């Protein structure tokens, strides 16, 4: 079995949480980040990718992830779970701290790829489009991922995916995933392997 068809990433472990990029450990591994609105399903998607329920903390209430949480996969890939942005009910000061932390990290990290998560029912919002523009300007590769695909029927899903693609400029079509049902996860894992672990 090649890396690209591996079923799970069984040797994944939590490395550490950091409050900003200055605390980032000096690790020489390809790195990807999981970004998106608060509550979009970032941490759940990581558990699905890792094939390990509960390794990454998730919650029904938005604002669950408050630090940059680093995970190491098979000693060959670093995956960073980011706090969600756009959580309107968090105190303004706290919101600003999260935004500074996310942008500071994205600006300084040597990222191979950012997974840009969008709720299949709602995204992209203005804040998502802003981040996408910012990634484009910085020449950072990103991949749109539609989360919670289990919430829609097949027809609605196709329609929403087309609308989302158009709203993001028509270049990249989001990969539909469901962390609950496991759909799209294998394909996403294979895409990450191709983008990060094999020489271009
Ligand atoms: N139906 C459905 N619900 C999901 C899915 N993925 C996540 N959820 C739910 O969405 C909520 C938020 O999930 P998280 O993974 O904690 O979201 P997050 O983006 O990490 O949230 P923050 O850390 O607060 O930014 C939880 O109630 C999850 O159970 C999915 O694939 N399908
Ligand atoms: Mg989270």
Image (cartoon, rainbow, N blue to C red):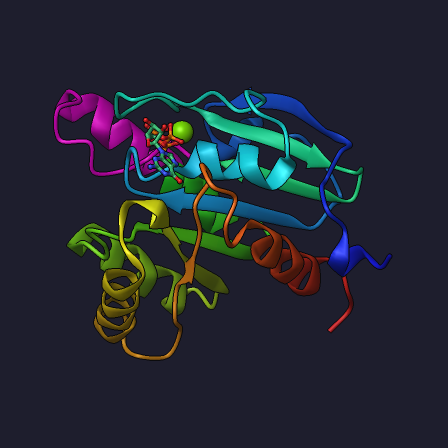
Q: Does the rendering let one see residue 111?
A: no
State the residue in front, 165 or 137: 165
Eyeballing the image, is 133 above or below 42?
A: below
Q: Quadrant of residue 173?
A: bottom left
> Which of the four quarters of the rendered structure image does ligand 2 lie in?
top left
Residue 179 place in picture, x, y as percent: 46, 40
Eyeballing the image, is 29 above or below 19?
A: below
Q: Quadrant of residue 124?
A: bottom left
Compared across the picture, whether 49 is left or right of 177 comes to right
Q: Any magenta on residue 93?
A: yes
Q: Any magenta on residue 91?
A: yes
The N terminus lies in quadrant = bottom right
Name which residue lies at 80% across and 38% down. Answer: 75
Question: Which residue range is magenta in the image?
Answer: 82-101
Q: Residue furthest bottom?
A: 170
Residue 83 place in picture, x, y as percent: 37, 31
Compared across the picture, whether 195 is left or right of 184 comes to right
Name which residue lies at 54% across and 20% down. Answer: 54
Name which residue lies at 59% across and 41% down. Answer: 49
Name which residue lies at 45% across and 50% down. Answer: 107
């Amino acid at each position: 079995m090649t890396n690209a068809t591996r079923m799970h990433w069984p040797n994944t472990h939590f490395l550490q949480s950091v409050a900003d990029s200055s605390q980032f450990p000096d690790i020489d591994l390809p790195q990807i980040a999981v970004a998106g609105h608060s509550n979009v399903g970032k941490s759940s998607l990581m558990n699905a990718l890792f094939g390990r329920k509960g390794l990454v903390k998730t919650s029904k209430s938005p604002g669950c992830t408050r630090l940059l949480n680093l995970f190491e996969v098979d000693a060959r890939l670093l995956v960073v779970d980011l706090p969600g942005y756009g959580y309107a009910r968090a105190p303004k000061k706290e919101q600003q701290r999260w935004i500074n932390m996310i942008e500071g990290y994205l600006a300084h990290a040597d990222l191979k790829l950012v997974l840009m998560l969008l709720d299949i029912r709602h995204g992209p919002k203005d804040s998502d489009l802003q981040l996408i523009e910012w990634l484009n300007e910085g020449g950072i590769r990103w991949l749109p991922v539609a989360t919670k695909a289990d919430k829609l029927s097949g027809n609605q899903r196709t329609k929403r995916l087309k609308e989302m693609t158009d709203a993001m400029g028509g270049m990249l079509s989001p990969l539909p995933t469901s962390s609950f049902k496991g759909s799209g996860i294998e394909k996403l894992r294979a895409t990450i392997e191709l983008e990060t672990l094999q020489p271009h």
